[in-house]
Every structure is written in C-alpha cells, then in structure tokens.
Image (cartoon, helix red, strand yellow):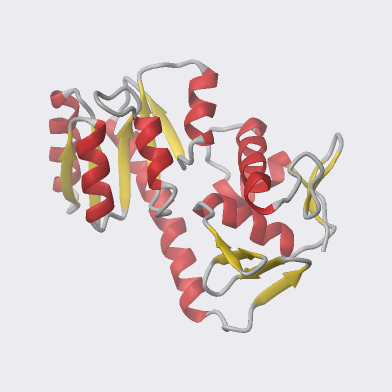
C-alpha cells in the first residue's frame, strides 16, 4: 500500500512515516500544498493523509483539485476542533478527518477501515456483471464500473458520492434516514453525524441535477431522510 503524508510540521510527518513504514506501507511525504498536489497527481497512491493548514495551497484546495481527477481516499488532518472546519473538509471531498493531537494508532485504524472499504468496492467491480446499468431520465449509472453519466457525459463523483447514489438508485423510493446512510456508506464506527450526509447529498445534487434546489432524482423526505425517484 502506498501512502502520501502531507503536513508542514516535519516532526508529525517523520512520526507518521516511521510508524507506517513499520507496518509495511510505502510512504511519500510533502510539506506544502503545491508539492502535495504534484505528487498526488503523478503518483499512484492508495490513500492520502492531508493537513488542512499548509503553505502555498491549503489542504482544502488540494483536496478540491484532486477530486476533479481522482477518487483516491483522503483523510484530513486538522488542528482545529470546530465542527464547521470538519464539515468543510468533507464538503471539499475528504473521506474522513482526524483532529490534532492524534494517536497514530487511531490514524492507522481509520486508514485500514477506509482501505478495507475501497478493497471491497474493487472486488465488487471485478465480479460485477457489465450489464448492471441503471438508466432513468438523462441519468445513467454503471454500477459495475462505478461511473455516472448525465446526458451521456460522465460526471466525476467521489467514492462516497457514488456510494450514496448507488445505494439509493438500486433501492428506488426506499427512504433512508441520515443515520441509515452513515451506517451503510461510512460504517458504524464513523464519528461523523447527519451533517456529513447532508453535505455529500448537496454535492451529489450539484453534479447530477439540473436544478439542485428542485431535485429530480435524489429527493428529500422531510423529517425522515433521502430517497431516489426512478
């Protein structure tokens, strides 16, 4: 497994690198946003640990640009404990966040949980039948290859955005509460709350709906949760 660790605090990078290499990970390091973006777009990483407060480009800017080209899992590292900063990190496409100071064992546990889900998704892709395609209106969802299209044009969804859409689309008109979606898509041990789901649904709607404020596909059941109108 190949990991990119990004932080301008060299002691943190050194500690993470040493601990991860002890577990058999291949580790590259970057100390500012520009270097991180260059490495992330040219290297083939399985996961990225990305600090929010970086020189040159912030971690949020790096994450946002990465999400235009890749769905590599990203865990944000932040010294700020404010909930809005955490939600903002997820809004920019991060898969998880960890607040400093952190225990390296927690970091590795979060990494393993995300990598397990990614591995499971890849196995599903390899074994899925290529005919697993959902078409409704101008939306086409290829669940075997994890691709989504609007009017024939591919939409670049993050891994979690696709997971949410796939779950809803394969169970049309079934209403899922925010806690249901958190448990199924993020896992029962994920520390986020319903706002995490709301952020991802909003981003998903912005990508697949002509009018995100009046969604055609991913709809809200007020006071309950979300469902897919097929």
Relative horizontal placement of residue 14, taking residue 150 as reference (left or right)? left
Q: Is residue 211 above or below residue 117?
A: above
Rendering coords of residue 168 (x, y %): 72, 57
Q: Residue 94 occupies which quadrant of the picture?
A: top left
Q: Residue at x 45, y 38 (%)?
A: 96
Rendering coords of residue 158 (x, y %): 51, 51
Q: Residue at x 43, y 33 (%)?
A: 97
Relative horizontal placement of residue 156, taking residue 7 as reference (left or right)? right
Please tell me which residue lies in front, 198 or 107: 198
**Quadrant of the image containing the N terminus:** bottom left
Relative horizontal placement of residue 47, taking residue 136 as reference (left or right)? left
Q: Residue at x 50, y 54 (%)?
A: 159
Please tell me which residue lies in front, 212 or 158: 212
Q: Is residue 115 above or below residue 11?
A: below
**Quadrant of the image containing the C terminus:** bottom right
Number of numbered labels in the structure image: 0
């Amino acid at each position: 497994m190949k990991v990119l660790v990004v932080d301008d605090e060299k002691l943190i990078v050194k500690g993470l690198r040493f601990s991860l290499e002890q577990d058999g990970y291949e580790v590259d390091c970057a100390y500012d946003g520009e270097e991180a973006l260059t490495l992330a777009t040219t290297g083939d990483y399985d996961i990225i640990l990305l600090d929010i407060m970086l020189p040159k480009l912030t971690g949020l800017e790096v994450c946002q640009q990465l999400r235009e080209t890749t769905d590599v899992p990203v865990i944000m590292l932040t010294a700020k404990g404010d909930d809005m900063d955490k939600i903002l990190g997820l809004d920019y496409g991060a898969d998880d966040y960890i607040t400093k100071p952190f225990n390296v064992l927690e970091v590795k546990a979060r990494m393993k949980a995300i990598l397990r889900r990614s591995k499971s998704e890849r196995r599903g892709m390899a074994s899925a039948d290529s005919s697993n395609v959902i078409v409704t209106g101008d939306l086409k969802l290829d669940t075997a290859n994890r691709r989504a299209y609007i009017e024939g044009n591919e939409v670049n969804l993050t891994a979690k955005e696709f997971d949410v859409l796939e779950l809803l689309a394969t169970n049309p008109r079934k209403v899922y509460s925010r806690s249901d979606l958190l448990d199924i898509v993020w896992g029962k041990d994920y520390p986020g709350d319903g706002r995490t789901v709301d952020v991802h649904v909003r981003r998903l709607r912005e990508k697949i709906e002509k009018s995100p404020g009046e969604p055609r596909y991913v709809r809200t059941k007020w006071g309950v949760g979300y469902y897919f109108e097929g």
